[in-house]
Image (cartoon, rainbow, N blue to C red):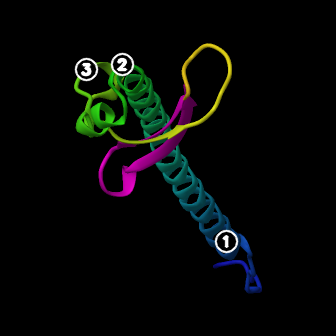
């Protein structure tokens, strides 16, 4: 009744190839997601570092004004400066000052002030600090 057909085993590579392709694609997706996460963390730290630089710069500018008006004690009494407005909210600047009297000819006086300002922003793994040193007479 049935025609006589010889049954031959079939060998295919479809399933192993499909498993291999799925494995390779999943590893690629995993690698790309880890790369994106690392890039996001680096960008966040870069932003905090820039904010810390601007906090240190702002602290140094305020300290220069105080040093020229009243000397180093006024600078040291103003430290630390805590910022609350704008892009520096949550940042602070720690100030330091040294003065040296010298025999300098010309306008501007004989006292040289060296002002140290350390700006810091963020907490934990996103914390960044930047240091600035300014000399003025």
Residue 117 or residue 2, whichever sits in front: 117
In the picture, residue 90 is in which quadrant?
top left
Position of 52 relative to 12 (above/below): above
Residue at image mark 3: 85
Q: CA distance from mark 2 to mark 1?
A: 74 Å
Q: CA distance from mark 1 to mark 3?
A: 56 Å
Main secondary structure found in the magenta portion: strand
Q: Which numbered mark, 2 or 1, is in the foreground of this view?
A: 2
Residue at image mark 1: 20
Q: Which numbered mark, 2 or 3, is in the foreground of this view?
A: 2
Q: Residue 107: which numbered mark, if any?
A: none
Position of 46 relative to 7 (above/below): above
Position of 4 relative to 28 (above/below): below
Residue 126 or residue 52, whichever sits in front: 52
Label whose residue precedes the other's in the sequence (2 or 3): 2
Q: State the image coordinates of residue 98 (x, y, percent, origin top left).
A: 45, 43
Residue 59 falls inside the magenta stretch: no
Label whose residue precedes the other's in the sequence (2 or 1): 1
- SS assignment at label 1: helix
Residue at image mark 2: 69
Label 1: how many residues lie within 10 Å, few (<14), some (14-19) or many (20+)? few
Q: State the image coordinates of residue 82 (x, y, percent, origin top left).
A: 24, 33
Q: Residue at x 38, y 28 (%)?
A: 63
- SS assignment at label 3: loop
Q: State the image coordinates of residue 72 (x, y, percent, origin top left).
A: 36, 35
Q: Which residues are magenta?
A: 111-137
């Amino acid at each position: 009744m049935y025609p006589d057909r010889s049954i031959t085993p079939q060998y295919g590579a479809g399933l192993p190839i499909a498993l291999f392709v799925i494995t390779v694609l999943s590893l690629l997706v995993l690698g790309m997601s880890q790369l994106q996460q690392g890039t996001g963390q680096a960008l966040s730290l870069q932003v905090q570092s820039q904010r810390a630089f601007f906090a240190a710069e702002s602290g140094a500018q305020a300290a220069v004004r105080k040093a020229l008006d009243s000397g180093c004690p006024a600078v040291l009494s103003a430290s630390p400066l805590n910022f609350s407005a704008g892009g520096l909210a949550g940042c602070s600047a720690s100030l330091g000052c040294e003065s040296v009297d010298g025999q300098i000819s010309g306008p501007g006086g004989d006292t040289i002030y060296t002002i140290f300002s350390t700006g810091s922003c963020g907490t934990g793994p996103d914390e960044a600090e930047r240091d600035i040193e300014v000399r003025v007479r």
